[in-house]
Image: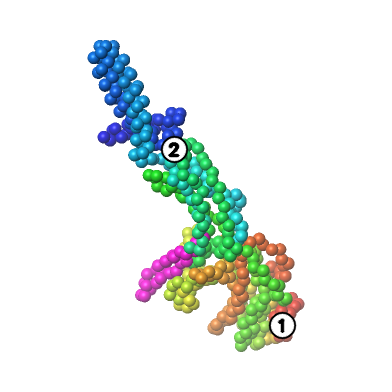
């Protein structure tokens, strides 16, 4: 039995190269070949028998040949019909998704258009095919055992924000060696969530093509595209944006000319320190933070201090606090000053710049999680708590806007005698 199956399969493979026969469905070809063989064999015997009885040996030969030809023809006809109706089809096809727009980047309200292309390795009967336009969110949180002896266990949950479907492939026969293209188009909503490739919070826009054919597994193709986060329209603020942190020994001010930036841009800002008494500072740093939060989890914060984007591994410090699960990523930092003595009545200004990485991680806010960006200043003193000032910025993935550079890219300080206003101009002097 196994030999017969192998022989039949080899014969079917050989018929693929025969013109017209190779275009038939596999079950039709199998029924055709089976019918030809059975019909030719049966009528060869019958034709030889009756031919021999009527005409002798010569009649037997002629009858056998005539019977095999007629039997093969009739058997092939009925076998093809039987195979098409009764046998399962076999074969394969490939599906791909192509976009009309190069790069696959779209803005809200734009139209995503392209085509689904199907290439048939074998002739197949198709039930039809659909393409889906999907926006999904993925949110992660970690769980720690009560004894905290094991590593945290990560749990990921998904949310579906949008599903659109188009029936683009009609039922029919796809012939072997041919390809067909079927166009599609979807409109992106005006309030679409932006693509976000974060760790705790992630938003993905994808196209899924699904081709269905009887008796074989569904044939699928996937393609991800990018939906940009447009820049919000904020009115200009004279003098820029400020964040002040007063303390008993000084006033720490963070001053930014603007708070809306595109990925890949440089944040320029100033640190302005107004001492209320003379004191020693161990270090003054500027940091750029990305804070991911989801309400899932057991109210803790993870401060990530080491990250390998290739392996996905990181080091972090886990502390109780916040709501749900919060991860704080240090995206960039700059030391503005090492150990320094700040004198009373001498304000100091440190211009600095920090670069926003281009990783498709814009500012994000959903009911299931949010991502915010912050610029911060940290003033460390020996034996005392740090003095900090933070200001939130909005990061988008649209086109960068040309802006006037209000501050030089340097971290050298500017000292001003007297308790000057943090936004006042000052003359430069080395400390």
Q: Quadrant of the N terminus?
A: top left
Q: Is 248 in the magenta?
A: no
Residue in the foreground of this view, choosing between 352 and 394: 394
Rendered image quadrant of residue 65: top left
- Can you see residue 196? yes
Q: Quadrant of the C terminus?
A: bottom right
Up/down of 396 relative to 115, above or below = below
Point 45% across, 69% down: residue = 141
Point 63% across, 74% down: residue = 337
Rendered image quadrant of residue 19: top left
Question: Relative to residue 385, is residue 8 drawn left or right?
Answer: left
Residue 365 % position (x, y) = 55, 69
Q: Is 150 in the magenta?
A: yes
Residue 392 % position (x, y) = 60, 73
Residue 54 % position (x, y) = 25, 13
Q: Which residues are magenta?
A: 135-159
Residue under label 2: 123
The colour style of the image is rainbow
């Amino acid at each position: 039995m196994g030999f017969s199956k192998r022989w039949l399969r080899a014969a079917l493979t050989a018929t693929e190269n025969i013109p017209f026969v190779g275009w038939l469905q596999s079950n039709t070809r199998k029924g055709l070949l089976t019918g030809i063989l059975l019909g030719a064999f049966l009528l060869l015997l019958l034709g030889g028998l009756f031919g021999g009885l009527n005409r002798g040996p010569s009649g037997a030969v002629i009858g056998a040949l005539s019977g095999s030809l007629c039997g093969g023809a009739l058997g092939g006809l009925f076998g093809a019909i039987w195979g098409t109706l009764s046998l399962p089809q076999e074969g394969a096809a490939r599906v791909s998704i192509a976009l009309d727009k190069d790069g696959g980047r779209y803005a809200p309200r734009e139209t995503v258009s392209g085509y689904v292309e199907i290439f048939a390795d074998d002739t197949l009967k198709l039930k039809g095919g659909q393409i889906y336009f999907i926006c999904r969110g993925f949110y992660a949180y970690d769980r720690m055992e009560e004894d905290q002896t094991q590593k945290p266990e990560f749990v990921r949950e998904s949310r579906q924000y949008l599903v659109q479907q188009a029936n683009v492939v009609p039922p029919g026969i796809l012939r072997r060696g041919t390809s067909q293209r079927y166009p599609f188009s979807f409109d992106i909503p005006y309030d679409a969530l932006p693509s976000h490739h974060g760790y705790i919070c992630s938003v993905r826009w994808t196209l899924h093509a699904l081709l269905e054919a009887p008796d074989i597994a569904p044939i699928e193709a996937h393609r991800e595209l990018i939906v940009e986060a447009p820049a919000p329209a904020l009115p200009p603020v004279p003098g820029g944006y400020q964040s002040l942190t007063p303390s008993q020994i000084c006033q720490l001010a963070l001053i930014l000319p603007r708070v809306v930036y595109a990925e890949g841009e440089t944040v320029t800002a100033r640190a302005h320190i107004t001492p209320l008494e003379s004191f020693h500072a161990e270090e003054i740093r500027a940091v750029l933070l990305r804070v991911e939060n989801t309400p899932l989890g057991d109210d803790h914060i993870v401060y990530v201090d080491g990250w390998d984007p290739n392996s996905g591994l990181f080091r972090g410090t886990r502390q109780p606090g916040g709501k749900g699960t919060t991860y704080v990523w240090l995206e960039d930092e700059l030391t503005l000053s090492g150990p320094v003595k700040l004198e009373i009545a001498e304000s100091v200004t440190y211009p600095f710049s920090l670069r926003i990485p281009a990783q498709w991680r814009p500012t994000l806010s959903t009911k299931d999680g949010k991502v915010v960006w912050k610029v911060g200043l940290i003033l460390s003193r020996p034996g005392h708590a740090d003095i900090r000032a933070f200001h939130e910025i909005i990061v988008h993935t649209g086109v960068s806007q040309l802006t006037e550079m209000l501050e030089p890219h340097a971290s050298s300080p500017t000292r001003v005698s007297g308790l000057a206003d943090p936004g006042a101009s000052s003359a430069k002097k080395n400390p």
